[in-house]
Image (tube, rainbow, N blue to C red):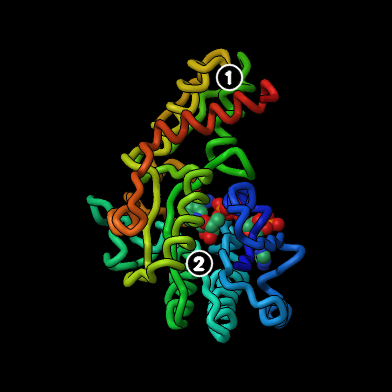
Amino acid sequence: MKIFILGANGQLGKELVKKSPSAFEISSFSKNEFNLSELDFCKDKILDLKPNWIINAAAYTQVDKAEEDIKTAYKINTTAVELLAKTVSSYGGRLLQISTDFVFDGMQSKPYSPKDKCNPINVYGQTKLMGEKLSLKFKGTIVLRTSWLYGNFGNNFFLKIFNLHKFQDSDSKEIKIVNDQIGCPTNTDNLASICWELIKKSEIKNPTEKIFHWCNSGETSWYEFAKSIGEISAEMGLIKNPAPLKAINSYQYNSLAKRPKYSVLNCSSTIEFLNLKQIDWKEALRFALYQKLNKEKNI
Ligand SMILES: NC(=O)c1ccc[n+]([C@@H]2O[C@H](COP(=O)([O-])OP(=O)(O)OC[C@H]3O[C@@H](n4cnc5c(N)ncnc54)[C@H](OP(=O)(O)O)[C@@H]3O)[C@@H](O)[C@H]2O)c1
């Protein structure tokens, strides 16, 4: 089975490549090799190689920048996604489109299920939701929504906070972190496994549902997440001491885009379809830090 991985240089893309099953014939593409803004090129490349599946981990992911660069965000997260679905389905291939908890407005106080109403409150969320809707019109598309992605690749909250804890000195100021947005961090290592399981299982038994959710289990705030990164890193000897943190609210944190106050995902239908358990977010964090420790020790 031939599989394309798009966005192969992104944090999820790298894990997907790393964890790709050897039974599959994988072609992975970075933005330079497969640019979603070059629609004709994308279409021709797909029709030329006819992959059975495309995993689209490429996206315009700069949430704040998207507020001012609506056109580009729309082209990458909406127009290109529709084109991928249309092209791959024209010969019976399938798209696994990665999407986001930011399709929800955050007004709910219990985990969002795939059937809950979407109402994005920022441009990034709006363009991702439109990408979902337009791609789902084509047979074979599956949407997998996730939240608060982090891992040892790329540029993410976990790595930024880890480095702030590690490289603090006596002159360092306390790190201000938002405490009133609740969600669930998701380790890319775990999400990549879920993507592969979804493809394997869908080949055996086509799911009746087309939208799935996946995150680690439990819920937390960005502040608690940052605090745990410091505490567990110190416990493992990766850093000397956690850096001082200060909890602030969203109003005190100047950002262009609004973020949902609550965006935990209900993953029950995915758990049932794949017959897999979720991993607690702190356990998944511990695993990411172990990977870092092993890398430092060159294991
Ligand atoms: N990060 C999160 O917290 C989060 C949460 C929920 C859902 N998601 C979704 O999960 C998926 C993976 O996200 P991620 O965190 O791995 O993002 P990421 O690290 O930012 O990776 C996205 C990749 O897309 C590539 N890309 C950007 N514009 C492109 C274009 N025009 N053509 C082709 N590739 C392009 C980027 O390339 P360059 O680096 O070269 O620009 C990057 O390698 C995305 O669909 C995202 O919406 C992410």
Q: Quadrant of the N terminus?
A: bottom right
In the rendered image, the residue lying farthest to the right is 32
Q: Residues within 10 Å of mark 2 (few under 14, many from 20)?
A: many
Give residue 160's position: percent from left, percent from top. Answer: 59, 35
Identify which residue, 78 or 62, lies in the foreground. 78
Residue that numbered label 2 is attached to: 96
Q: Amino acid at mark 1?
A: Leu
Give residue 78's position: percent from left, percent from top. Answer: 53, 74
Q: Amino acid at mark 2?
A: Leu
Residue at 46% of width from left, 74% of height from top? 141
Identify which residue, 139 or 171, lies in the foreground. 139
User: Is residue 230 shown above or below 123?
Assistant: above
- Helix or strand or loop: what does disc 2 sit on? strand
* 209 left or right, relative to 30: left
Residue that numbered label 1 is attached to: 238
Give residue 12's position: percent from left, percent from top. Answer: 57, 51
Who comes first in sequence, dot 1 or dot 2? 2
**Is residue 197 in sight in this rendering?**
yes
**Is residue 63 in sight in this rendering?**
no
